Amino acid sequence: MSTTLSDRLSEYAGVARNLGMDAVALVPGPNFTRALGHSFMSHERPFLLVIPAEGAAAALVPNLELGSWELTGFEGAVFDWRDQTGYQDAFVALMDHLRISSLAVEGQVMRVFVHHALLAAQPDLRIIDAEAEISGLRMIKTPEDIAALQRAIDISERALTRTLETVAPGQSEKQIEQTLIRFLFEEGADGLSFPPIVAAGDNSARPHAHARADYAVREGDALLIDFGARKDGFAADITRTVFLGHASDEAQAVYETVLRANLAALAVTRAGVTAHEIDDAATCVFEASPFADRIRTKTGHGLGRDVHEAPYIMRGNMAELPAGTVYTNEPGLYQIGNFGVRIEDDVLITQDGCQVLTRFPKDLQVISC
């Protein structure tokens, strides 16, 4: 992150200029937090930061947030509103102040009612979706960003180590999930990156499974755990798959195939590589194996303030990835009704290669029962 609020706001002004738009608008979320250096909740009250291509930024702020807003050091015009009077007059005052005719917004974050309130205040306002350009500023991580991400990863891995030491047949997926969450907070997490995925047996074949309270893990099960701690605004995202008691010949073969795909993706990772090339390296391993029919997902996605952000590691994405990009390398194979395996690392792209930020072992692990 840039050192001053003015520096950070100027980056978003640059996005507006590059797009030929009069201004960029941000709402609470990762870009809002990056710009201001403070986080705010997204709730039923509209909250808006508008950064013109030229001139001072302005904000629409719920009155009850003014005390927290003062901590940002923001020096532009602020239009506040109260629940008792509603927010539309504040939108009118904001637009009258800005005198803009076009606005670039975060298409994946801005909610429809905020969009409608802007147009009600200025019906001729041209609004475009600039999610890629706005969020693209977050793709190259600063040393401070990487340090925060490493703290989140380290917390996560300590919690996973402790959790696996407690796993035993007869526990439910939900019990294992609760243990993991407790250890994450004990190890220093500020929050969860997302609700953990704890899936055993046939449930592990569902890439976004939910932990079951009515399934007791048993010998021979694959146990897939996908989770992450959030620390200092950054989210870890790690997956490891272990086996209880023993791993069948099939399980070993699938696991080794997934591990080879993970390593193949790392082998091609360097500054200037395309997202397509990384995914292709992993997917080619799968396609050349006996398990090609178990491919269900792309290889990964960007990681930072959001768990899923640019770049998306998939065939057809020809975007070249610069040094400082962090992505998840998470190839997996899944057979519905049987089991799934995923191995996920968090990877920093460097000028001449990559640094794997996750250190948890990737060799096939069998938990003794």
Image: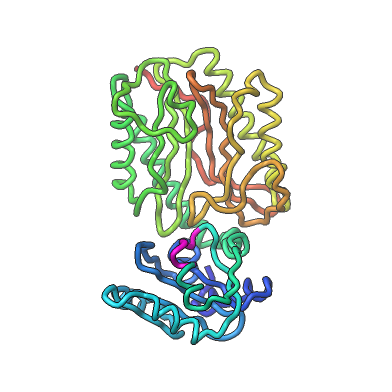
Q: Quadrant of residue 9?
A: bottom right
Compared to residue 349, the image places residue 86 above or below, namely below
Identify the image quadrant of the C terminus.
top left
Q: Quadrant of residue 59?
A: bottom left
Look at the image and say whether residue 114 sits in the magenta stretch. Answer: yes
Where residue 359 appears, as percent x and y from the top left, is 50, 40
Compared to residue 51, the image places residue 194 above or below, namely above
Compared to residue 199, the image places residue 50 above or below, namely below
Where residue 257 appears, as percent x and y from the top left, is 61, 24
**Residue located at (44% from left, 21% from top):** 202
Judge by depth and name the residue closer to the eye, 288 or 295: 295
Residue that extends furthest to the left in the rendered view of this protein: 84
**Residue located at (56% from left, 62% from top):** 142
Residue that extends furthest to the top in the rendered view of this protein: 249
Please give left or right for residue 263 compared with residue 207 in the image: right
Q: How many marks on residues?
A: 0
What's the magenta region? Answer: 109-115
Where residue 171 appears, as percent x and y from the top left, is 29, 24
Compared to residue 349, the image places residue 226 above or below, namely above
Look at the image and say whether residue 102 sits in the magenta stretch. Answer: no
Judge by depth and name the residue closer to the eye, 54 or 180: 54
Q: Quadrant of residue 184?
A: top left
Please give left or right for residue 87 compared with residue 304 in the image: left
Where residue 61 appears, as percent x and y from the top left, is 38, 76
In this picture the colour scheme is: rainbow
Judge by depth and name the residue closer to the eye, 69 or 242: 69
